Image: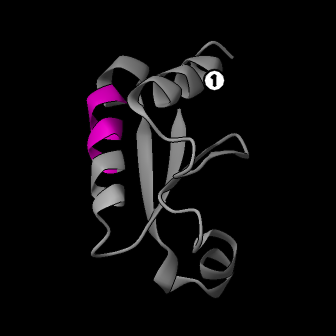
Amino acid sequence: MTVYFYTKTACPLCDEAKWMLEMFQDEYGLQVEERDIYTNDQWLEQYQLIIPCIQVNGEILDASQLSWESLKKFLEQYARK
């Protein structure tokens, strides 16, 4: 399953989210594509207020929703499809 991880440098919340993704990587067969929002104007405009955010199949889990349990539930939802 491909996961797009929108992030930026010097972001402690992003570091924590990345660690969580790494913990789930084998369990869900994740292929994580890390995207620095400062390398793309569209990403910067769209995600600057909600990073870190994780996108799977067009659905977003953003910083306001991100926890171990919410990420697990989010990934399980798409692993079954």
Is 49 covered by the magenta stretch? no
Near mark 1 (Cα within 10 A), the count class, few <14, some 14-19 or many ≥20, is few
Residue 13 percent across, percent down from the top left: 35, 57
User: Residue farthest to the right?
Assistant: 58
What residue did someone put label 1 on?
78
Q: Amino acid at mark 1?
A: Tyr
Q: Residue at x 48, y 31 (%)?
A: 71
Instruction: Identify the main secondary structure in magenta.
Output: helix
Q: State which region is magenta.
A: 18-24
User: Residue farthest to the front?
Assistant: 64
Q: Is residue 8 above or below residue 12?
A: below
Is 19 covered by the magenta stretch? yes
> Where, by quadrant of the figure, is residue 75 drawn?
top right
Color theme of the render = one colour
Q: Residue at x 60, y 80 (%)?
A: 44
* Quarter of the image where the C terminus is located: top right
Report the number of numbered marks: 1
Of 49 and 46, the residue lying toward us = 49
Residue 53 percent across, percent down from the top left: 53, 54
Q: Residue at x 58, y 27 (%)?
A: 74
Q: Residue at x 63, y 12 (%)?
A: 80
Circle 1: element type: helix
